[in-house]
Amino acid sequence: MRAELGRLVGSEHVLDAGPGSPYNLDSSRRRGIEGRADAVVLPGSAQEVAAVVGWCYAHDVPIVPRGGGTGLAGGAVAIEGGVVCSLERLRRIRELQPELWRMLPEAGVSTRHVQRLARENGLFFGPDPGAAEQSQIGGNVATNAGGPHALKYGVTGAWVSGVEVVLAPGELVELGGWVRKDVAGYDLRGLMIGSEGTLGVITAVRLRLLPAPEAAIPLVVFTRDRAAGCAAISEVFAAGLRPSVLDFLDGETLSMAARSYPTAQGAADGSLSAIPPDAGFALLLEADGTRAEAEGERGALLELLAGAAVAVHEPRSAEALWRWRDGINPVVTAVRGGKVSGDVVFPLERLYEGLTRFEAIASAHGLRSCAWGHAGEGNVHATVLVDPELEQELDAAEEVSEELYALAGELGGSLAGEHGVGWMKRGRLALQWPERAIELHEQVKRAFDPKGLLNPGKKLAR
């Protein structure tokens, strides 16, 4: 196998995938999610990707597309063996047209590089998933990744006007294009977005961009408890305000992350301003637009939320605030050495109920829990802390996860908000979908991948 694949991409770009290979893991690090790939292939062009897919399809070998390996659902892990097709060498920016607000990066370009190029040209790429330096734009599209700014600007798919993709049995095709209006056929481009490599291998992406906002003003609003915080979220929507970010942290998360909280504007001596001791919930907001629009939105938010707040901080630096927010995941993990998180969505009007019931589920299993996420979308990173050396805690965490998925379905939400289904949540779509929808999901998979070789076992409806 490695010899034949080497003839397609160069022998130096076919790697062994033995025990300990980083290509057999992703960032989920969950029990049971470790691959056993037979080979790792690093194609250098879209044509080489097509050749690899063609060889795998001709020889009935599973093929698992892989971006930066930052996924949290086991989506890029070769659980069933086969070939891992890593897109990391596809790093060209094929087109950058600032005057038309668009860019065409290849799949292996990092998210941060896309953001940086846009900014250097007076433009803005809104999606901001975690691990932006490592995650790749192809993987972001394949999982339809989100982030804090998705409230105003949408998840990755909202910025994609077309994809170049390799379809079975090895054909390189273009779906979509640069036109801004196109209702001529079924949305095949949209089917690729969020398909997690189960329908094709994305090799390049046509991205729409926007002019960069002139100003972005961050706010942190602390409330006494979860009830007050969730009520304040609803008030923001009822008032017709549209912040670019509306994130939340519950009291447990606040207590764990308090030591690294950034300086707040107005501190008399310029020192760190501690999180208020009576704060049991926090909202992280950002107002952006022209300077006048951002200032106006800021003032409206402050006026609206003053009654619910025990304190309001205005960080000097939005960058420092979001760096602190991005660091919450490792901080929480370090408390006991491990954690198990569920990326679920609750309807906004049932966010308080979902958070309260999740806490009760974790407590019933003897586990400490916390939650944070994107409040404006009801997207919750519901987390339990575990000692990874204790099998009984890992078992309990898995039981909590199952009950959490069921809770999301019961409340009319979703078991996956931005991390995808991957391997970890396979077979559970019946919790939120009717039978006919599941049948259509399966028919789409068969139409694109009749042999079932594209990322097998992932994103399964049941």
Image (tube, grey):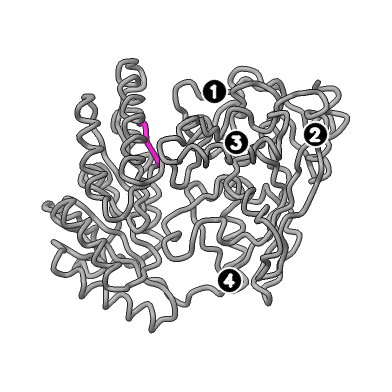
Give the distance between the C-alpha atoms of the residues marked 3 and 4, in whole angstroms: 39 Å
Q: Earlier in the sequence, mark 2 or mark 1?
A: 1
The picture quadrant where one finds residue 313 is bottom left
Farthest right residue? 7
Give the distance between the C-alpha atoms of the residues marked 2 and 1, in whole angstroms: 23 Å
Farthest front residue? 436
Q: Earlier in the sequence, mark 2 or mark 3?
A: 2
Residue 17 versus residue 396: which sits nearer the camera?
Answer: 396
Above or below, 458 relative to 390: below
Image coordinates for residue 113, horizontal then vertical, percent: 61, 56
Give the distance between the C-alpha atoms of the residues marked 2 and 3, in whole angstroms: 25 Å
Give the distance between the C-alpha atoms of the residues marked 1 and 4, in whole angstroms: 39 Å
Give the distance between the C-alpha atoms of the residues marked 3 and 1, in whole angstroms: 25 Å
- Tag 3 near tag 4, CB within 8 Å: no
Q: Which residues are magenta?
A: 339-343
Q: Earlier in the sequence, mark 4 or mark 2?
A: 2
Which residue is found at the position 35% from the left and 17% from the top?
389
Disc 3 packing (10 Å; few <14; some 14–19; many ≥20): some
Residue 287 on the magenta segment: no
Disc 4 packing (10 Å; few <14; some 14–19; many ≥20): many
Q: What residue is pinned by disc 4?
A: 123
Q: What residue is pinned by disc 1?
A: 34
Q: Earlier in the sequence, mark 3 or mark 4?
A: 4
Image coordinates for residue 264, horizontal then vertical, percent: 26, 63
User: Which amino acid lies under the numbered mark 2 shown in the image of this protein?
Assistant: Val
Q: What residue is pinned by disc 3?
A: 442
User: Which amino acid lies under the numbered mark 3 shown in the image of this protein?
Assistant: Glu
